[in-house]
Amino acid sequence: MKRTSVLIIGAGAVGCAIARELSKYDLEIILLDKNSDVGGDASKSNSSIIHTGYDATPGTLESRLVVAANPMYDRLCEALDVPFRRIGAILPAFSEEQFEQLPGIKEKAFQNGVYDVEYCSAETLLAMEPMLNPRVMGGLFIPRESIIDPFVYVVALAENAVQNGARLMLEAKVLDLMREGDAIVGVETEKGEIRADWIINASGLYCEEIARMAGKADYKVNPRRGQFYILDRETSCKVNRIVLPIPTKRTKGKLISPMIHGNLLLGPTAEDLTDKTNHETSCEGLESVAADVRRLVPDIQIADTITQF
Protein backbone atom coordinates (compact mmCIF):
# COMPACT_ATOMS: atom_id res chain seq x y z
CA MET A 1 0.00 0.00 0.00
CA LYS A 2 1.31 3.43 -0.96
CA ARG A 3 1.42 6.24 1.62
CA THR A 4 1.64 9.99 1.12
CA SER A 5 1.15 13.28 2.91
CA VAL A 6 -1.11 14.79 0.24
CA LEU A 7 -3.16 12.99 -2.39
CA ILE A 8 -4.62 15.11 -5.21
CA ILE A 9 -7.44 13.55 -7.23
CA GLY A 10 -7.46 15.01 -10.75
CA ALA A 11 -4.53 16.10 -12.93
CA GLY A 12 -6.24 18.93 -14.76
CA ALA A 13 -5.30 22.61 -14.51
CA VAL A 14 -6.38 22.91 -10.87
CA GLY A 15 -4.92 19.64 -9.65
CA CYS A 16 -1.58 20.21 -11.38
CA ALA A 17 -1.35 23.78 -10.08
CA ILE A 18 -2.00 22.55 -6.52
CA ALA A 19 0.61 19.81 -6.93
CA ARG A 20 3.20 22.28 -8.18
CA GLU A 21 2.56 24.74 -5.35
CA LEU A 22 2.68 22.08 -2.63
CA SER A 23 5.80 20.55 -4.16
CA LYS A 24 7.72 23.63 -2.98
CA TYR A 25 7.39 22.31 0.56
CA ASP A 26 8.68 19.26 2.42
CA LEU A 27 5.68 17.07 1.61
CA GLU A 28 5.09 13.74 -0.04
CA ILE A 29 2.60 14.32 -2.86
CA ILE A 30 0.76 11.97 -5.18
CA LEU A 31 -1.18 13.42 -8.12
CA LEU A 32 -3.47 10.90 -9.76
CA ASP A 33 -5.88 10.86 -12.67
CA LYS A 34 -8.16 8.35 -14.36
CA ASN A 35 -6.91 9.35 -17.84
CA SER A 36 -3.71 8.32 -19.61
CA ASP A 37 -2.31 11.87 -19.59
CA VAL A 38 -2.67 15.09 -17.66
CA GLY A 39 -4.94 17.90 -18.78
CA GLY A 40 -7.85 15.81 -19.98
CA ASP A 41 -11.49 16.86 -20.22
CA ALA A 42 -12.16 20.58 -19.65
CA SER A 43 -8.51 21.56 -19.10
CA LYS A 44 -7.62 20.92 -22.74
CA SER A 45 -10.93 21.91 -24.38
CA ASN A 46 -11.67 25.54 -23.63
CA SER A 47 -11.30 29.07 -24.99
CA SER A 48 -7.60 29.33 -24.01
CA ILE A 49 -8.31 32.72 -22.42
CA ILE A 50 -7.02 33.96 -19.07
CA HIS A 51 -9.79 36.30 -17.94
CA THR A 52 -9.43 39.34 -15.71
CA GLY A 53 -12.72 38.73 -13.92
CA TYR A 54 -14.23 41.97 -15.22
CA ASP A 55 -17.68 40.40 -15.65
CA ALA A 56 -17.75 38.02 -12.67
CA THR A 57 -20.44 38.52 -10.05
CA PRO A 58 -18.86 40.80 -7.41
CA GLY A 59 -18.21 39.20 -4.04
CA THR A 60 -18.32 35.62 -5.31
CA LEU A 61 -15.58 33.05 -4.95
CA GLU A 62 -15.16 33.11 -8.74
CA SER A 63 -14.56 36.85 -8.68
CA ARG A 64 -12.00 36.69 -5.87
CA LEU A 65 -10.05 33.83 -7.43
CA VAL A 66 -10.04 35.08 -11.04
CA VAL A 67 -9.05 38.63 -10.10
CA ALA A 68 -6.29 37.38 -7.78
CA ALA A 69 -4.96 34.82 -10.26
CA ASN A 70 -4.74 36.97 -13.39
CA PRO A 71 -1.61 38.95 -12.37
CA MET A 72 0.19 35.74 -11.42
CA TYR A 73 0.35 34.40 -14.97
CA ASP A 74 3.17 36.64 -16.23
CA ARG A 75 5.78 35.32 -13.80
CA LEU A 76 4.29 31.82 -13.71
CA CYS A 77 4.39 31.33 -17.48
CA GLU A 78 7.86 32.83 -17.67
CA ALA A 79 9.07 30.39 -15.01
CA LEU A 80 7.45 27.44 -16.78
CA ASP A 81 8.44 28.58 -20.30
CA VAL A 82 4.79 28.55 -21.38
CA PRO A 83 3.69 30.93 -24.16
CA PHE A 84 1.37 33.62 -22.80
CA ARG A 85 0.23 36.90 -24.38
CA ARG A 86 -1.70 39.84 -22.96
CA ILE A 87 -3.45 40.85 -26.16
CA GLY A 88 -6.49 42.50 -24.57
CA ALA A 89 -10.15 42.22 -25.52
CA ILE A 90 -12.81 44.49 -26.93
CA LEU A 91 -16.49 44.34 -26.06
CA PRO A 92 -18.37 46.07 -28.90
CA ALA A 93 -22.01 47.15 -28.81
CA PHE A 94 -24.10 47.01 -31.99
CA SER A 95 -27.49 48.22 -30.74
CA GLU A 96 -28.89 50.81 -28.36
CA GLU A 97 -29.82 48.03 -25.95
CA GLN A 98 -26.26 46.69 -25.93
CA PHE A 99 -24.78 50.18 -25.73
CA GLU A 100 -26.85 50.93 -22.63
CA GLN A 101 -25.37 47.85 -20.91
CA LEU A 102 -21.80 49.14 -21.14
CA PRO A 103 -21.85 51.36 -18.01
CA GLY A 104 -23.16 48.46 -15.93
CA ILE A 105 -20.43 46.15 -17.24
CA LYS A 106 -17.74 48.75 -16.51
CA GLU A 107 -19.16 49.31 -13.01
CA LYS A 108 -19.14 45.55 -12.36
CA ALA A 109 -15.50 45.44 -13.44
CA PHE A 110 -14.71 48.27 -11.01
CA GLN A 111 -16.48 46.44 -8.17
CA ASN A 112 -14.32 43.40 -8.94
CA GLY A 113 -11.13 45.43 -8.76
CA VAL A 114 -10.57 45.47 -12.52
CA TYR A 115 -9.95 49.20 -12.81
CA ASP A 116 -8.39 49.46 -16.28
CA VAL A 117 -11.50 48.83 -18.42
CA GLU A 118 -11.89 51.73 -20.86
CA TYR A 119 -14.73 53.17 -22.93
CA CYS A 120 -13.97 53.29 -26.67
CA SER A 121 -15.72 55.09 -29.49
CA ALA A 122 -16.78 53.30 -32.65
CA GLU A 123 -13.91 54.99 -34.49
CA THR A 124 -11.38 53.78 -31.93
CA LEU A 125 -12.66 50.21 -32.05
CA LEU A 126 -12.57 50.13 -35.86
CA ALA A 127 -9.03 51.47 -35.79
CA MET A 128 -8.08 48.70 -33.36
CA GLU A 129 -9.95 46.01 -35.31
CA PRO A 130 -10.60 47.00 -38.95
CA MET A 131 -12.55 43.80 -39.65
CA LEU A 132 -15.09 44.57 -36.93
CA ASN A 133 -18.73 45.00 -37.96
CA PRO A 134 -18.99 48.68 -39.07
CA ARG A 135 -22.36 48.93 -37.29
CA VAL A 136 -20.49 49.16 -33.99
CA MET A 137 -21.68 52.05 -31.81
CA GLY A 138 -18.90 51.93 -29.21
CA GLY A 139 -17.67 49.52 -26.61
CA LEU A 140 -15.17 48.64 -23.92
CA PHE A 141 -11.50 47.70 -24.01
CA ILE A 142 -10.23 45.23 -21.39
CA PRO A 143 -6.44 45.40 -21.77
CA ARG A 144 -5.35 42.50 -19.55
CA GLU A 145 -7.45 39.73 -21.11
CA SER A 146 -4.89 37.18 -22.26
CA ILE A 147 -4.33 33.97 -24.21
CA ILE A 148 -2.38 30.82 -23.37
CA ASP A 149 -1.86 27.28 -24.64
CA PRO A 150 -3.91 25.45 -21.99
CA PHE A 151 -2.55 21.97 -22.65
CA VAL A 152 1.10 23.05 -22.64
CA TYR A 153 0.39 24.99 -19.44
CA VAL A 154 -1.03 21.95 -17.63
CA VAL A 155 1.80 19.70 -18.81
CA ALA A 156 4.35 22.27 -17.58
CA LEU A 157 2.70 22.44 -14.15
CA ALA A 158 2.73 18.65 -13.84
CA GLU A 159 6.32 18.31 -15.06
CA ASN A 160 7.55 20.95 -12.61
CA ALA A 161 5.70 19.28 -9.74
CA VAL A 162 7.31 15.94 -10.63
CA GLN A 163 10.73 17.60 -10.90
CA ASN A 164 10.16 18.84 -7.35
CA GLY A 165 9.42 15.33 -6.09
CA ALA A 166 5.69 14.84 -6.58
CA ARG A 167 4.59 11.45 -7.91
CA LEU A 168 2.20 11.22 -10.88
CA MET A 169 -0.14 8.23 -11.21
CA LEU A 170 -2.14 7.98 -14.43
CA GLU A 171 -4.90 5.51 -15.37
CA ALA A 172 -5.65 5.32 -11.65
CA LYS A 173 -9.37 5.94 -11.36
CA VAL A 174 -10.64 6.34 -7.80
CA LEU A 175 -13.07 3.53 -6.99
CA ASP A 176 -13.84 4.43 -3.38
CA LEU A 177 -12.56 6.22 -0.30
CA MET A 178 -10.99 4.34 2.61
CA ARG A 179 -12.37 5.00 6.08
CA GLU A 180 -11.41 4.37 9.67
CA GLY A 181 -14.40 5.30 11.77
CA ASP A 182 -15.53 8.75 10.64
CA ALA A 183 -12.14 9.61 9.16
CA ILE A 184 -11.26 9.31 5.47
CA VAL A 185 -7.73 7.92 5.41
CA GLY A 186 -7.11 7.09 1.77
CA VAL A 187 -8.45 5.97 -1.58
CA GLU A 188 -8.95 2.75 -3.46
CA THR A 189 -7.86 3.09 -7.08
CA GLU A 190 -7.56 0.84 -10.10
CA LYS A 191 -3.86 0.61 -9.21
CA GLY A 192 -4.30 -0.20 -5.55
CA GLU A 193 -4.84 1.54 -2.24
CA ILE A 194 -3.20 4.81 -1.18
CA ARG A 195 -3.24 6.14 2.37
CA ALA A 196 -2.99 9.92 2.75
CA ASP A 197 -3.01 12.52 5.51
CA TRP A 198 -4.81 14.96 3.24
CA ILE A 199 -6.99 14.28 0.18
CA ILE A 200 -7.82 17.08 -2.27
CA ASN A 201 -10.71 16.67 -4.68
CA ALA A 202 -9.70 18.42 -7.91
CA SER A 203 -11.53 16.07 -10.24
CA GLY A 204 -13.38 18.73 -12.22
CA LEU A 205 -16.50 17.38 -13.90
CA TYR A 206 -16.35 14.36 -11.62
CA CYS A 207 -16.05 16.25 -8.32
CA GLU A 208 -19.55 15.23 -7.34
CA GLU A 209 -18.75 11.52 -7.60
CA ILE A 210 -15.81 11.94 -5.23
CA ALA A 211 -17.88 14.19 -2.96
CA ARG A 212 -20.60 11.54 -2.85
CA MET A 213 -18.05 8.95 -1.74
CA ALA A 214 -17.19 11.36 1.10
CA GLY A 215 -20.85 11.62 2.11
CA LYS A 216 -21.60 14.96 0.44
CA ALA A 217 -24.68 13.87 -1.49
CA ASP A 218 -25.93 17.41 -2.11
CA TYR A 219 -22.90 18.48 -4.18
CA LYS A 220 -23.84 18.79 -7.86
CA VAL A 221 -21.92 19.52 -11.05
CA ASN A 222 -23.98 20.61 -14.05
CA PRO A 223 -21.93 19.83 -17.17
CA ARG A 224 -22.03 22.28 -20.05
CA ARG A 225 -20.63 21.65 -23.52
CA GLY A 226 -19.08 24.37 -25.65
CA GLN A 227 -18.46 23.83 -29.37
CA PHE A 228 -15.65 25.67 -31.18
CA TYR A 229 -14.16 26.20 -34.62
CA ILE A 230 -10.42 26.58 -35.14
CA LEU A 231 -9.43 28.43 -38.33
CA ASP A 232 -6.20 28.12 -40.29
CA ARG A 233 -3.37 30.51 -39.46
CA GLU A 234 -3.49 31.80 -43.04
CA THR A 235 -7.16 32.80 -42.93
CA SER A 236 -7.69 36.15 -44.65
CA CYS A 237 -9.91 37.70 -41.97
CA LYS A 238 -8.08 38.09 -38.68
CA VAL A 239 -8.38 40.03 -35.44
CA ASN A 240 -5.59 41.28 -33.20
CA ARG A 241 -7.48 41.03 -29.93
CA ILE A 242 -10.20 38.93 -28.35
CA VAL A 243 -13.58 40.12 -29.63
CA LEU A 244 -16.25 39.48 -27.01
CA PRO A 245 -20.02 39.72 -27.32
CA ILE A 246 -22.09 41.51 -24.70
CA PRO A 247 -22.51 38.78 -22.02
CA THR A 248 -25.82 37.50 -20.73
CA LYS A 249 -26.72 36.08 -17.32
CA ARG A 250 -26.30 32.56 -18.71
CA THR A 251 -23.17 32.78 -20.82
CA LYS A 252 -20.33 35.00 -21.99
CA GLY A 253 -21.53 34.31 -25.54
CA LYS A 254 -19.61 33.33 -28.67
CA LEU A 255 -16.30 35.10 -29.17
CA ILE A 256 -13.50 35.42 -31.69
CA SER A 257 -9.98 35.07 -30.35
CA PRO A 258 -6.46 34.76 -31.72
CA MET A 259 -4.76 31.61 -30.48
CA ILE A 260 -1.25 31.45 -29.11
CA HIS A 261 0.12 29.71 -32.24
CA GLY A 262 -1.57 32.02 -34.77
CA ASN A 263 -4.89 30.30 -35.44
CA LEU A 264 -8.29 31.84 -34.82
CA LEU A 265 -10.78 30.41 -32.31
CA LEU A 266 -14.56 30.86 -32.68
CA GLY A 267 -17.14 29.90 -30.06
CA PRO A 268 -18.35 28.44 -27.82
CA THR A 269 -21.90 27.28 -27.53
CA ALA A 270 -23.24 26.73 -24.00
CA GLU A 271 -25.26 23.52 -23.91
CA ASP A 272 -26.43 21.95 -20.66
CA LEU A 273 -25.90 18.18 -20.73
CA THR A 274 -26.51 15.16 -18.54
CA ASP A 275 -23.80 12.99 -20.13
CA LYS A 276 -20.36 14.17 -18.97
CA THR A 277 -18.63 12.04 -21.62
CA ASN A 278 -20.45 13.64 -24.57
CA HIS A 279 -17.77 15.47 -26.57
CA GLU A 280 -19.67 15.42 -29.87
CA THR A 281 -20.09 18.44 -32.11
CA SER A 282 -23.32 19.10 -33.98
CA CYS A 283 -24.31 20.91 -37.16
CA GLU A 284 -26.82 22.95 -35.20
CA GLY A 285 -24.30 24.00 -32.58
CA LEU A 286 -21.57 24.93 -35.04
CA GLU A 287 -24.02 26.80 -37.27
CA SER A 288 -25.04 28.91 -34.27
CA VAL A 289 -21.37 29.73 -33.64
CA ALA A 290 -20.90 30.79 -37.26
CA ALA A 291 -24.02 32.97 -37.21
CA ASP A 292 -23.14 34.70 -33.94
CA VAL A 293 -19.49 35.46 -34.69
CA ARG A 294 -20.48 36.95 -38.07
CA ARG A 295 -22.43 39.57 -36.12
CA LEU A 296 -19.11 40.60 -34.62
CA VAL A 297 -16.93 40.23 -37.73
CA PRO A 298 -19.04 39.75 -40.89
CA ASP A 299 -16.18 38.58 -43.13
CA ILE A 300 -15.00 35.77 -40.87
CA GLN A 301 -14.02 32.81 -43.08
CA ILE A 302 -15.66 29.67 -41.72
CA ALA A 303 -14.40 27.88 -44.85
CA ASP A 304 -10.87 28.17 -43.41
CA THR A 305 -11.78 25.81 -40.56
CA ILE A 306 -9.13 23.16 -39.86
CA THR A 307 -11.00 21.43 -37.03
CA GLN A 308 -13.90 21.67 -34.62
CA PHE A 309 -14.26 20.44 -31.06
Image (spheres, rainbow, N blue to C red):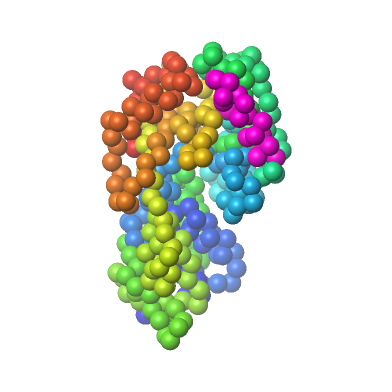
Q: Quadrant of residue 286?
A: top left
Q: Where in the figure is residue 15, as x and y percent of width and height?
A: 48, 59
Q: What stretch is highlighted in magenta?
A: 91-110
78 in relation to 158, above or below: above
Q: Tell whether position 108 is magenta.
A: yes
175 in relation to 249, above or below: below
Tell me the residue at 60%/17% (across/down): 137
Q: Quadrant of residue 193?
A: bottom left
Q: Where in the figure is residue 173, as x and y percent of width and height?
A: 33, 65
Report the number of numbered marks: 0
Chief secondary structure of the magenta portion: helix
- Residue 20 seen in the current view: yes
Tell me the residue at 33%/33% (across/down): 285
88 in relation to 125, above or below: below
Specify the quadrant that holds the N terminus. Answer: bottom left
Q: Where in the figure is residue 244, as x and y percent of width and height?
A: 53, 30
Question: Residue 112 or 23: which is nearer the viewer?
Answer: 112
Q: Tell whether position 235 is magenta.
A: no
Tell me the residue at 50%/74% (across/down): 198
Question: Residue 24 or 225: which is nearer the viewer?
Answer: 225
> Which residue occupies the extreme bottom position in the image?
181
Q: In this view, does 165 lie to the left or right of 103?
A: left
Tell me the residue at 48%/30% (across/down): 255
Q: Where in the figure is residue 59, as x and y percent of width and height?
A: 64, 51
305 in relation to 169, above or below: above
- Residue 242 seen in the current view: no
Question: Residue 112 or 90: which is nearer the viewer?
Answer: 112
Specify the quadrant that holds the C terminus. Answer: top left
